[in-house]
Amino acid sequence: MKLSIVGCGYVGTVTGVCFADLGHDITFYDLDEKKLALLGAGKAPIFEPSLEELIRRNQHRFTTTSDLTGAVHDTDLTFVCVGTPSQEDGSIDLSYVLSACSAIGKTLKNLPDFHPVIIKSTVFPGSTGGSICSVLEKKSDKKAYVDFGLGSNPEFLREGTAVPDFCTPDRIVLGADDERTMGALRSLYTPFECPKIETAIRTAEMIKYASNAFLATKISFANEIGNLAKKLGIDSEKVFEGVGLDRRIGPAFFGTGIGFGGSCFPKDVRALIAGAKDYDEHLRILPAVLQVNEGQPLVVVRLLQKYLPDLRGRKIGVLGLAFKPDTDDVRESRAIPIIRQVLDAGAEVIAYDPLAMENFASLFSEITYAPSAEAVLSAEAVLITTAWEEFEHLDYHGTIVIDGRRVAAASRDARVYEGVCW
Ligand SMILES: NC(=O)C1=CN([C@@H]2O[C@H](COP(=O)(O)OP(=O)(O)OC[C@H]3O[C@@H](n4cnc5c(N)ncnc54)[C@H](O)[C@@H]3O)[C@@H](O)[C@H]2O)C=CC1
Ligand SMILES: O=C(O)[C@H]1O[C@H](OP(=O)(O)OP(=O)(O)OC[C@H]2O[C@@H](n3ccc(=O)[nH]c3=O)[C@H](O)[C@@H]2O)[C@H](O)[C@@H](O)[C@@H]1O
């Protein structure tokens, strides 16, 4: 099939490149010319392990363009993969999706063929069939589900493992309210062997939110129990090893520590809470999930002050700035509230991250960025905020370490060692 991808960030680029690898012809479109230029030159516009290699291998199967009409007219289906950030009140900002769909709608006006528009961005249930459908119909002067197709195909990949997650997912969710769009999605995903759920658009949208909200809940639950476990002298890792062996529960996403960051869990949980209010549903579990999550970074600073009560003038090292390992993404990284608090208490910060220092520097110019992880170890105390593999190979002898991510080498060798929930 010929596919156009609108929005070449983490989801759009990975989706396009992985479908190219399956033999499809891809046209990438983005408002950001820099991203298109990088893709056009065979380079990844975002950092993701193994992505660049896949781009090089499939470059003959994709083109980049700043002409959206050409992209839509020359392809059989369009994926919308633009961002859906949080607004002040926690609800999602649909403006990027609406603006992309307004432009797509205009291109549909003179297109004689039936062209499915598939929303891959995470949007609140009802958005695709509601305001997104309206803008497409208005700009195209056509009827959705009859003259053009509309569907939802939420994405479940994780940053850092996006390529394998996309290629071998646990399940694929196909949301469509017309048979032709469902048929196109079904045929596109034929080579994937995992379970596939075919459902209504708004159900597909809700599956995405419920999945992220549940995973976030698992993490906050583990952290709440973990905080208590630490006070009782119990290691939370052993606890959740035991809990996770129950097949009804499962071991994944019980990693305790400083909580979840990133561009999705915090935003999607907030969006579900805010969106529910419009239906007079006041969610109670999810606000608590966020509350626990906001408290976890503060535990690190509290533990640090056990050893250095007055942080004024102290030099504090921070290992890890990305929201998780194997990415340069710092959106809602847990290092942000930790560093802010340490700075507010009057300390100096020296930090290191293998990939994310440049992105972090746009948020914090007032800290020192170290040339290596070793250089951070000379600080008076070291906080570990991302579980990068290379932090397992440092010599922590003589250091005070407060560990938010459970690095075994630090727990073994540090002069003073405190884990957040262990
Ligand atoms: N990052 C992730 O791991 C995952 C993200 N998602 C969801 O996918 C969506 C996209 O997320 P990311 O890829 O992380 O976003 P991103 O911020 O990395 O990329 C979005 C891209 O859309 C482009 N864009 C914005 N407006 C546009 C327009 N009108 N026309 C064309 N391009 C436009 C931006 O320039 C940017 O390159 C969000 O809804 C997110 O919640 C879903 C699963 C995983
Ligand atoms: O909708 C999305 O964008 C994506 O959000 C998450 O993926 P991602 O945010 O990329 O990364 P995760 O591996 O889920 O980690 C999120 C945060 O939770 C933290 N985490 C994760 C697992 C765990 O056990 N404990 C824990 O604190 C990580 O350190 C990180 O800060 C989901 O895992 C994906 O399925 C989903 O597609």
Image (tube, grey):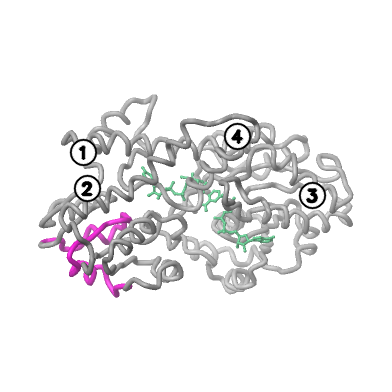
Q: Nearer the viewer, mark 4 or mark 3?
A: 4
The disc at residue 230 is: 1
Distance CA(mark 4)–CA(mark 3): 23 Å
The disc at residue 419 is: 2
Distance CA(mark 2)–CA(mark 3): 50 Å
The residue tagged with tag 3: helix, strand or loop? helix
> Which quadrant, please, contains the C terminus?
top left
Q: Nearer the viewer, mark 2 or mark 4?
A: 4
User: Magenta stretch containing residue 320, yes or no?
Assistant: no
Distance CA(mark 1)–CA(mark 2): 9 Å
Ligand number 1: quarter of image: bottom right
Nearest to the observer: residue 277 or residue 217 = 277
Q: Amino acid at mark 4?
A: Ala
Nearest to the observer: residue 366 or residue 319 = 366
x then y, percent, for residue 13: 58, 59
Q: Amino acid at mark 2?
A: Gly
Mark 2 lies within 8 Å of ligand 2 (Cβ measured): no
Q: Amino acid at mark 3?
A: Val
The residue wearing badge 4 is 276
Q: Are marks 4 and 3 in contact (CB under 8 Å)?
A: no
User: Magenta stretch containing residue 383, yes or no?
Assistant: yes
Q: Residue at x 54, y 57 (%)?
A: 10
Q: Residues within 10 Å of mark 3 (few under 14, many from 20)?
A: many
The residue tagged with tag 2: helix, strand or loop? strand
Q: Are marks 1 and 2 in contact (CB under 8 Å)?
A: yes
Tell me the magenta residue range.
Answer: 369-397
The residue tagged with tag 4: helix, strand or loop? helix
The residue wearing badge 3 is 135
Q: Amino acid at mark 1?
A: Lys
Residue 245: which quarter of the image? top left
x then y, percent, for residue 94: 66, 50
Mark 1 vs 3, N-terminal side: 3
